[in-house]
Image (cartoon, rainbow, N blue to C red):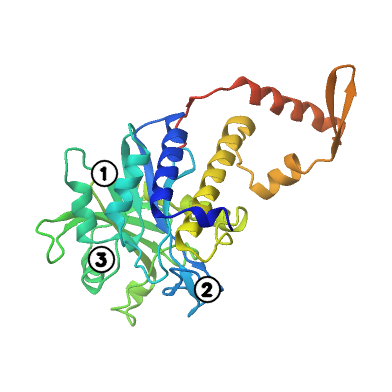
Amino acid sequence: MRYFSKFDQGTNQRVFQAMYMWFFDQLRFDNFTVDMDSTVMSRYGQQEGARRGYNPHKPGRNSHHPLLAFIADCRMVANCWLRSGDAYTSNNFQGFLEDTLDKLTGKKVGLLRADSGFYSREILEYLERGERPIPYIIAVRLYPAIQRMLSGHRQWIQLGDGVEVADSYYESPGWGKARRMIMVRQKISVRPKATGKSLRLFPDDDLYGDYRYGCFVTSLELPAGVVWKIYRMRADAENRIKELKYDFGAGSFNVRQFSATEAAMNFVMLAYNLMSLFRQIVLSGKVQPTLKTMRYKLFSIAGYLTKEGSARILKLSLAMKRREWFTGLWNKSRSFDLPIQFASHL
């Protein structure tokens, strides 16, 4: 606590700007996908910035509402800002995105994905302007006008069992221009676990009650079904948030000072990135194990050091069939060096 209390806002900016920039400079990838998301972290004290806001699991409880940016291609955290609990999802989006791009200096964002909390005219205009506009897919809030657009659309293309897609152009009041909307509806009887929402404007109409709807605004020119499938991959960001909270304790490292809590969180994010690098480069399996699994299989193995002449030998308590696999990990960890060439997972 004494260590983190030395961090103020200026120190956080200098330290983590340099650390993120150095880390991502060691990873050779470009034209990647950024997923923006926010999460709620409940607090049980009088920490600075802890406010009552949207807290679905513990209504009325003080919380912080951090904003996060993930690089989907290499499954890492690109940036993290701590915010007060009463901050709206998209608050400070422009400053946060600019800070994220600074941390990723020299790299190009090929796509930005975000949920409906980031659906606003200001954000869309910000992403579209400038010499290098950022392509995007953002979920649309189902306002009454959007629901009427969905209910009035008649030409749907069947994408699979119980899934239909369509696209159209829609101009919301105050936009000044029309933007492309990708519409999706899924039949509940065929896909009972389908994501999306019912059209509440028509609660007594069986036709609309049989479906769950989703809508996305995009600057991409790809087919509607492809855009929807690309957006669905954003769900992996939710898995990253759960892992950060439950395996890495991102929501547990908090102290009274706001900047100190933000510093602790960013150290957690960097630790997560190092573990993600270890999983993908050294373990390199199709299934990415959680930290709990790695702790059980790799890090919490009994052992002791012995000495033969001038050589020190580490003896581990490993079954014979696991020794070859473990030796392979040691050898692989010696075989790679920075910088690392990353291939896209998408």
Horizontal relation, residue 145 to residue 244: left or right: left
Q: Which one is nearer the viewer's eye here, 12 or 243? A: 12
The crowd level at tag 3 (other Cα within 10 Å; few <14, some 14-19, many 20+) is many
Q: Earlier in the sequence, mark 1 or mark 2?
A: 2
Q: Earlier in the sequence, mark 1 or mark 3?
A: 1
Question: Which label sits in the foreground, 1 or 3?
Answer: 1
The crowd level at tag 1 (other Cα within 10 Å; few <14, some 14-19, many 20+) is some
Q: Position of residue 7 (x, y in %)?
A: 47, 53
Q: Earlier in the sequence, mark 3 or mark 2?
A: 2
| Residue at numbered disc 3 | 150
Q: Which quarter of the image is occupied by the C terminus? A: top left
| Residue at numbered disc 1 | 135
The type of residue carrying mark 2 is His
Secondary structure beneath label 2: loop
Q: Position of residue 12 (x, y in %)?
A: 43, 49
| Residue at numbered disc 2 | 57
Question: Which label sits in the foreground, 1 or 2?
Answer: 2
The type of residue carrying mark 1 is Pro
Secondary structure beneath label 3: helix
Query: Could you give the CA–CA distance between mark 3 and mark 2, rounded to whole angstroms?
Result: 31 Å
